[in-house]
Amino acid sequence: MTTSPTAPVAGSLPPAPDAKIAMGWMHTARFLTTAAQLHHLPPIHVPEIAFVGRSNAGKSTCINTLTQQKQLAFASKRPGRTQHINLFSLGKHGVTDAVLADLPGYGYAKVSRSDKLRWQQVMVNYLVSRPGLTGIVLLCDPRLGLTELDEALLEVLRPRVEEGLKFLIVLTKADKLTRSEQARVLSITRLNAAGGDVMMFSALKKQGVDEVAQLLWQWAHPVQPGAPAALPADGPATASATSDALEDSQQN
Ligand SMILES: Nc1nc2c(ncn2[C@@H]2O[C@H](COP(=O)(O)OP(=O)(O)O)[C@@H](O)[C@H]2O)c(=O)[nH]1
Ligand SMILES: [Mg+2]
C-alpha cells in the first residue's frame, strides 16, 4: 500500500522509524502479567502483538534479543515448560503504548496429548477472539520450515490477516544457514506466508533485529485519521544476510 505523506490512510503503517528509536522502544519492555487461561488475561487498550511458534523455535531468545534484556522471556533449556501466556508492556516514560504477548510454544514431543490439545485450543481461542490483537509474529526454525502445526495455525490466521491483522514470519537461527540457503528458505516461506512479511533473524549474529523492531514499532503506531505521519522514514526494512554455523541444544 502506498500513502501520500500529506494524507495518510487511517490504520496504515507510518514510515519506518530510525532503528535506534525502534530498539529504544523495545528496550522499555517490562513484565505485565501472566495467565494460564485466556479469561484471566486483562483487557488491553493498546495494540497487542503476539509471539507464537513451535517449542524450541527460538521465541524466548528472539524476545530477549529484541528487548535487549537477558531474562525477560526465559530462554528455557527445557522446551514446552512455559505453559502460560506472558504479557509485557512497551512504552517510553512508563506510558504503555503496546503489549507483547508471549504464547506457549507448541509441538513439544514430551508434553502429554491432553496438554497439547488444551494448549492448541487456548492458542486458537486467543488468536480468533483476543480484542486488540494487532499483529502476530510466528517464529520458525528455517531448517524445519513451516511444520504441520505452523500450517494449521496459518489456516486459523488467514481470515484474520485478510481482515487486517498484521503478520510476520521470523526465520530464526539464520546463523545456521549459508547465504544461499537463507535466500531459498526466504522465498519458499514468502509463498506460504498468507500475505504476511518474512524476515531472517539471528540472535547470535544480531541479524534482522533492527528490521523486526522497526516493523513492530510501525504495527503499534498506525497512522491516525487526519494525523501527519509520526516520524521521518529511515528507508525500507530489509534483512541482510550473514552466515556461520553454531550449535544449539536440540529437542525432538
Ligand atoms: N545458533 C542459534 N541458536 C539460537 C538462536 N536463537 C535461539 N537459539 C537456540 O535455540 C534453542 C531454543 O531457543 P529458545 O529461545 O529457548 O526457544 P523457544 O522454545 O522457542 O522459546 C536454545 O538452545 C537457543 O540457544 C539463534 O539465533 N542462533
Ligand atoms: Mg521459550
Image (cartoon, grey):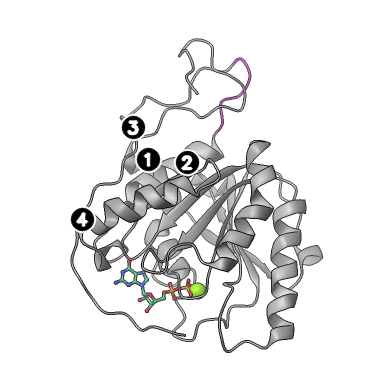
CA distance for labels 2 and 1: 9 Å
Placement of 227 over or under 189, stated as above or below:
above
Amino acid at dot 2: Trp
CA distance for labels 4 and 3: 21 Å
Residue 229 at x, y = what percent? 48, 21
Q: Residue at x 77, y 65 (%)?
A: 38
**Disc 2 + disc 1, Cβ < 8 Å:** yes
Q: Secondary structure at mark 4?
A: helix
Q: Which residue does the numbered mark 3 point to in the structure image?
A: 236
Q: Is residue 155 left or right of residue 3?
A: right
Looking at the rendered image, the disc whose residue lies closer to the viewer, 2 or 4, is 4
Q: Which residues are magenta?
A: 222-226
Q: Secondary structure at mark 2?
A: helix
- Front position in the image: 211 or 193: 193
CA distance for labels 1 and 4: 29 Å
Looking at the rendered image, the disc whose residue lies closer to the viewer, 4 or 3, is 4
Neighbours of disc 3 within 10 Å: few (<14), some (14-19), many (20+): few
Q: Secondary structure at mark 1?
A: helix
Q: Residue at x 45, y 63 (%)?
A: 140
Q: Residue at x 55, y 49 (%)?
A: 94
Q: Is residue 109 left or right of residue 5?
A: right
CA distance for labels 2 and 4: 27 Å
Looking at the rendered image, the disc whose residue lies closer to the viewer, 2 or 1, is 2
Placement of 111 over or under 87, stated as above or below:
below
Tell me the quarter of the picture where residue 204 sits: bottom left
Amino acid at dot 4: Arg
Answer whether residue 219 is magenta in the image. no
**Disc 2 + disc 3, Cβ < 8 Å:** no
Q: Secondary structure at mark 3?
A: loop
Amino acid at dot 3: Pro
Q: Which residue does the numbered mark 2 point to in the structure image?
A: 217
Q: Which residue does the numbered mark 4 point to in the structure image?
A: 179
